[in-house]
Image (cartoon, grey):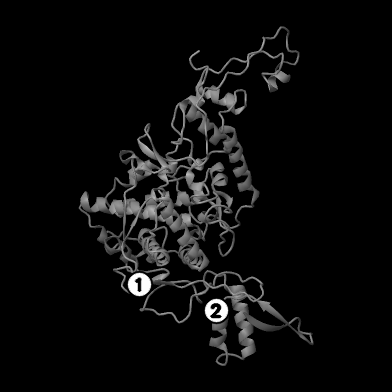
Amino acid sequence: MNEIDLDVSEQSTRSLTINVRVPMQFERCVQKLDGTRCTPGNAKLWCLRQVLWDASSVDAEMDEPEIVQMNITPLTTPIFGAEEEPEVAANVVVATKSIEAPADLLHPQTGFRMRREYRMLSYQQRQRFHDALNVLYDNGVIDTMARIHRRALRRGGAHDGPAFLPWHRAFLAFFEEELRKVDSRVSLPYWDSSFDDNMAVGPGFSVMWDDEHLGEGSGIVDSGPFANWTTVRTPLRRDIHRTVARGVGSLIRQSKIDTVMSFCRRSDFDRRWENGHNNVHRWVGGTMARSLSASDPVFYMHHAFIDYQWEKFRQRQRNVCSVDPAYDYPDSDDVRHHADTDMIGMTFLKNEDGIADFWTDNWYGYEDTPTCATNCGNRPDLFCDEDINLCVSEVRFDIGFRRKKREAPPKREPLVFDDPFGDRGICARNPYARGCPVPAPPISDEGFVEAMLVHEIPLPPGMDEIELNMKKEVALGFKFPPDNEPLSFSAAEDEPNDCRSVETATFDFLNVAVRGKKVTNRGYSRAAFDNPFRHK
């Protein structure tokens, strides 16, 4: 903490000592200027103005976060945040940890590791992963990585071009090293969001967003393993219900994977795959959709899946297309994406280094995503939807349906007199009111669902609670004001958006269940949704 004397006005005869929280580059700035370019007092004032008004500029060069190569570019001091506006505080200085890559880039310090789908982790493995992430949050690594990625996102050279995949490959590898320095048993899992997109009831019901997995998905993340995390600007936030209700973004569709895997060259693969990547950022919303997206653990798991599918494409290039992926670097009009350009934030690497084979030869490999043929890994969070022969995510609500048929609504005597109010009377508002004509029972599944939604037919046990919880989540998501920062990931015309309100989500849930669709593997019974009128 630096104490600086500032006159409250030019006419003041006394000075006031105030405490101002400033980034560490203030001290470095003073050391550079003091006695060389100006008087000590002027140096302090100039540097204070620099950090107070200029530190948030994306063009500021002082102390921007970098990943540096160990023993090649040694650091004498840790790297501190330089981009954010300082806050007034008393005797508080917040520093972020420097990130060091191994001196021998061909071989990671912590050894080879295998990445697997997040839901394939055992409970203990998942807990270790969460614990390691929390250590990186506490020691500043998450913050530093998020600012490195923001710098690359804003200045270019890591998105919207052929450097996208190789840049993020290196970025993830160095982040995974930090995880393994905390716990060498941990590797970075990937999130196959197609499992959630495959859900007949919709991805908003996925187990991924419960407290045993990634925590709150609607609004401020105040539950789960990452509860109360903050970025350098705002609390960690996700806006699944807000973005989905507005038709913003979508998860990776199996059809998208099938499409991109039909090509042989990265020039055909890259743009399509990056568009799909963008839509997932937009679907999760909140922090994930903006410049500090790497503050959310979801970021790293999402990008691990993007990298995994790229690696499968590379294997296809080599085994099917007779193309060597280590030399398939597309041309670009943007010099920041040229093969021989330094990686932004990792200047000891060239963009073309990201397509070298040593990453997957020596650093990490992937366990294939589970399939119905493997019974979806026999994990409790996944099951096979036999109708589409694809694995789907479990639902996050405890449904607890009882195995019995729903009863028909009580029969009432038909009207013996005319309703003087017609459609405007009580019968229009409540067709089961006393003295109203008995409505015709629904004969279709859709009609049966509609009757349940308006409570003409009781909801199955547990479904009314799910509907209530969904409404609460949506209300919570809209309780907080939207981020004032615009979305950082552009939408593509060829990417369809997922759009559903809580009403349509509840309808979808009931509709697929009434039709006999399997929506969960946890004691689900088709009889719970039997339409007693179906065969009458």
The residue sitting at 29% across, 68% down in the picture is: 107
Number of numbered discs present?
2
Give percent across and percent down for residue 134. 50, 62
The residue sitting at 79% across, 87% down in the picture is: 13
- Crowd class of label 2 (few under 14; some 14 to 19; many from 20; radius 10 Å): many
Residue bearing the label numbered 2: 25
Give percent across and percent down for residue 443. 52, 17
- Disc 1 is placed on an element classified as loop
Question: Between residues 321 and 511, which one lies in front from this camera angle?
Answer: 511
- Disc 2 is placed on an element classified as helix
Q: Amino acid at mark 2?
A: Gln
Q: Amino acid at mark 1?
A: Pro
Q: In this image, 13 relative to 335: left or right?
A: right
Give percent across and percent down for residue 446. 52, 24
Question: Between residues 237 and 406, which one lies in front from this camera angle?
Answer: 406
Residue bearing the label numbered 1: 102
Q: In this image, 202 relative to 8: left or right?
A: left
